Image (cartoon, rainbow, N blue to C red):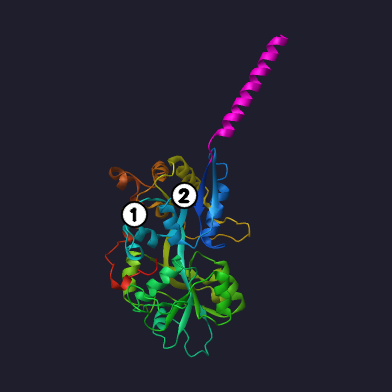
């Protein structure tokens, strides 16, 4: 009997040692997650994904890395320097087709794969609210038609905020200049008018705005941005309506790239009189990957995002800044335009949950989606023209 126990114990020790050696020698893969500027909405969402995906997949880790935003993220993932990232959908679309800001590249970004929509990001354009100022900005046309020099802070170079600000200027007939490179050409043309933009991190731009070194801040962001929330506490600001009194070309851009959205001033003010909605433009933020990411990794990430979205929508990062999103609608977030290639791992999850369907089942499974969502989604006309030239951004 003693011999039997000795044999069993010996076998268990051999099995344990073998299993330990095998486990230690299994290759572990780390997936890089590109976010955005520190403390921004991209950073907060990616931080939530990073923390939730820990130990979800055997021998797999995830690590976040900061970036300057959408354009940098698209390049990183397409070159396989990052595995997952976030981007404004207008830029994601352009990178796939190789147009506008991406048309001078040797080829379009064919390695990118759609994973999911994350939330809607809105343009926040704030200026000083000082009625005694002779050149008060009340609309985007006021800005581009200004007879005085105006400088607007737009975040880091090659960020989605910079891109969107330049677009808004161009569709209003103004070719803005970079205040640090005032003689630099864009699309073969020198800056026109008196509008300039300044790149910088949000702390610096908010300080410049407060001290009147710049005239406003233009930021693409989700609801209740912490930097704007801090600014409204210490100075009088005005949120500019970006829909009214704007160029007719904006209607084309709205059909092509953007949605008509609104900023809830209640996110920034407590007073009852400040509970109004300010019309603005918005876009989806896309979570994407490349074509070499394993299906099971993407499937697990999408599954966790959709089934526990309430956690992501109210995630808390290490600085305890809340991540706010709006209008969570699974059918809208899962929608993948025909110009994109959806990652097989994401497709598998969406099919299982009837969020997408094969063509012959489409009208039966997704009647609501087909009738109510798709008809209001983007119809992309050919707007690539001299008014939309972004050659110098990249």
Magenta: main secondary structure equals: helix
In the rendered view, does 387 fall on the left or right side of 303?
A: left
Residue 2 seen in this snapshot: yes
In the picture, the quarter occupied by the N terminus is top right
In the picture, the quarter occupied by the C terminus is bottom left
Q: Residue 339: percent from the left, percent from the top?
A: 31, 54
Q: Any magenta on residue 253?
A: no
Q: Any magenta on residue 19?
A: yes
Residue lying furthest right: 2
> Relative to 292, is 384 above or below?
below
> Relative to 162, is 130 above or below?
below
Residue found 29% across the figure and 72% down from its top: 386
Residue found 63% across the figure and 57% down from its top: 318
Q: Start and end of the magenta stretch?
A: 1-28
Q: Residue 131: percent from the left, percent from the top?
A: 52, 88
Residue found 38% across the figure and 79% down from its top: 191
Judge the density around disc 2: few (<14), some (14-19), many (≥20) Cα neighbours within 10 Å: many
Judge the density around disc 1: few (<14), some (14-19), many (≥20) Cα neighbours within 10 Å: few
Label 2 to label 1: alpha-carbon separation = 21 Å
Relative depth, front residue between 324 and 204: 204
Whether label 2 touches label 1, CB < 8 Å: no
The residue singled out by tag 2 in the image is 83
> Of discs 2 and 1, which sits in the foreground?
2
Q: Residue 313: percent from the left, percent from the top?
A: 53, 56
Which secondary structure lies at badge 2?
A: loop
The residue singled out by tag 1 in the image is 337
Residue 270 seen in this snapshot: no
């Amino acid at each position: 009997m003693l011999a039997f126990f000795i044999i069993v114990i010996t076998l268990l020790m051999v099995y344990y040692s073998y299993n330990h050696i095998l486990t230690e020698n299994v290759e572990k893969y780390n997936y890089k997650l590109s976010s955005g500027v520190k403390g921004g909405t991209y950073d907060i969402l990616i931080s939530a994904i990073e923390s939730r995906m820990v130990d979800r997949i055997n021998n797999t880790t995830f690590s976040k890395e900061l970036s300057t935003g959408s354009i940098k993220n698209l390049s990183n993932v397409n070159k396989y320097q990052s595995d997952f990232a976030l981007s404004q959908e207008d830029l994601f679309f352009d990178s796939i087709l190789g147009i506008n800001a991406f048309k001078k590249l040797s080829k379009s970004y064919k390695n990118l794969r759609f994973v999911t929509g994350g939330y809607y990001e809105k343009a926040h354009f704030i200026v000083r609210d000082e009625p005694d100022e002779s050149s008060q900005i009340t609309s985007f046309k006021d800005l581009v038609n200004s007879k005085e020099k105006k400088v607007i802070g737009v975040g880091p170079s090659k960020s989605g905020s910079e891109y969107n600000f330049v677009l808004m200027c161009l569709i209003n007939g103004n070719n803005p200049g970079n205040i640090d490179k005032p003689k630099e050409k864009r699309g073969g043309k020198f800056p026109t008018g008196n509008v300039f933009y300044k790149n910088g991190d949000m702390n610096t731009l908010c300080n410049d705005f407060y001290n009147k070194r710049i005239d406003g801040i233009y930021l693409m962001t989700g609801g209740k941005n912490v930097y704007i929330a801090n600014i409204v506490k210490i100075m009088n600001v005005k949120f500019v309506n970006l829909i009214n009194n704007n160029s007719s070309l904006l209607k084309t851009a709205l059909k092509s790239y953007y949605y008509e959205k609104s900023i809830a001033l209640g996110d920034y003010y407590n007073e009852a009189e400040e509970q109004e909605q300010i019309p603005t433009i918005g876009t989806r933020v896309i979570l994407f990957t490349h074509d070499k990411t394993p299906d099971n990794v993407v499937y697990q990430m999408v599954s966790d995002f959709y089934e526990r979205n309430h956690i992501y929508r109210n995630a808390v990062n290490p600085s305890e800044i809340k991540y706010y999103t709006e209008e969570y609608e699974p059918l809208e977030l899962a929608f993948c335009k025909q110009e994109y290639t959806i990652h097989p791992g994401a497709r598998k999850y969406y099919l299982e949950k009837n969020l997408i369907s094969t063509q012959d089942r489409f009208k039966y499974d997704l009647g609501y989606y087909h009738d109510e969502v798709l008809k209001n989604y983007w119809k992309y006309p050919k707007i690539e023209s001299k008014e939309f030239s972004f050659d110098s951004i990249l």
